[in-house]
Image (tube, rainbow, N blue to C red):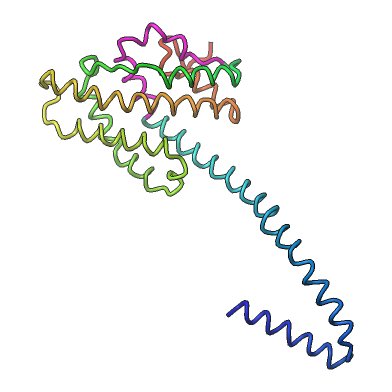
């Protein structure tokens, strides 16, 4: 209806122009000229300007998403990765690979990314205090649920998958009444759930570290000093 109203208004104005000046030739010249410009206007508006605005919106979404991911690591992720990685019996052999430095280049991050994709993640649940581990996760369940309610989460599928894995692991732990007296078979099952979180969390941690280094050096500095893989990490600046 709005479009039809605009067309009707245009027709009326052209009619008024004709009634005043009685010059159909003049009206035709300008009308054809304006119609000829329409394809260029569509190109300019729908392709160039729209693409420019879309890039700006995408940048804002990435910034908002990484703020949420940063909040997750501050509240849950860093401590979770510290506990789980300490239960990796093979980590000491390759721990130095995870110690990110402030002089790292894009190729250094790419090398670690490739390493993490092929790393044989192992978790021994017997090396984790499951009672305190479960209590810590359950206390953060409402916070993690609030993250899933944010529609921007659907823009980053790997992080959404990580949250699902953490939720599942939390439920597995919470349903067990006595975590201190589990049979060996059940500990093996829990190790599988924790291993799934470990692999997703480590890769997401690396992506977030790379984003921080490129965009927020002051946040990256703190992240290096609280690196969950670095046994010598200290928040105190030496």
154 to 27, vertically: above or below: above
Residue 6 picture quarter: bottom right
Q: Quadrant of the N terminus?
A: bottom right
Pick the residue in front: 135 or 64: 64
Query: Is residue 96 highlighted in magenta?
Result: yes
Q: Which residues are magenta?
A: 77-101
173 to 119, vertically: above or below: below
Query: Is residue 58 highlighted in magenta?
Result: no
Work out which residue is located at the far top of the displayed protein and give it: 93
Work out which residue is located at the far bottom of the displayed protein and give it: 19
The residue located at (55%, 29%) in the rendering is: 211
Image coordinates for residue 19, horizontal then vertical, percent: 84, 93
SS majority, magenta: helix
Taking the image as shown, residue 215 lies to the left or right of residue 89, namely: right
The residue located at (74%, 88%) in the rendering is: 12
The residue located at (49%, 40%) in the rendering is: 65
118 to 65, vertically: above or below: above
| Count of number-bearing discs | 0
Pick the residue in front: 4 or 25: 25
Taking the image as shown, residue 223 lies to the left or right of residue 145, namely: right
Taking the image as shown, residue 168 lies to the left or right of residue 53, namely: left
Residue 77 picture quarter: top left
Residue 95 picture quarter: top left
Image coordinates for residue 200, horizontal then vertical, percent: 38, 28
């Amino acid at each position: 209806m709005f479009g039809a109203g605009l067309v009707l208004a245009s027709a009326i104005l052209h009619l008024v122009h004709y009634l005043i000046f009685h010059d159909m030739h003049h009206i035709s010249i300008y009308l054809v000229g304006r119609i000829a410009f329409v394809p260029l206007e569509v190109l300019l508006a729908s392709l160039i300007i729209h693409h420019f605005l879309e890039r700006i919106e995408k940048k804002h979404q990435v910034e908002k998403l990484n703020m949420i991911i940063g909040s997750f690591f501050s509240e849950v992720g860093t401590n979770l990765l510290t506990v789980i990685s300490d239960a990796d019996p093979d980590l000491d052999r390759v721990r130095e690979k995870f110690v990110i430095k402030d002089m790292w280049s894009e190729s250094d991050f790419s090398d670690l990314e490739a390493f993490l994709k092929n790393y044989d993640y192992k978790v021994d649940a017997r090396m984790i205090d499951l009672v305190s581990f479960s209590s810590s996760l359950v206390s953060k369940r409402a916070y993690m649920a609030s993250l899933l309610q944010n529609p921007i989460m659907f823009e980053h599928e790997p992080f959404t998958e990580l949250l699902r894995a953490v939720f599942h692991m939390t439920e597995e732990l919470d349903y067990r009444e006595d975590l201190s007296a589990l049979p060996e078979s059940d500990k093996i099952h829990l190790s599988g759930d924790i291993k799934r979180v470990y692999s997703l969390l480590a890769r997401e941690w690396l992506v977030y570290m790379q984003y921080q280094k490129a965009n927020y050096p002051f946040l990256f500095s703190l992240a290096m000093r609280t690196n969950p893989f670095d046994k010598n990490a200290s928040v105190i600046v030496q």
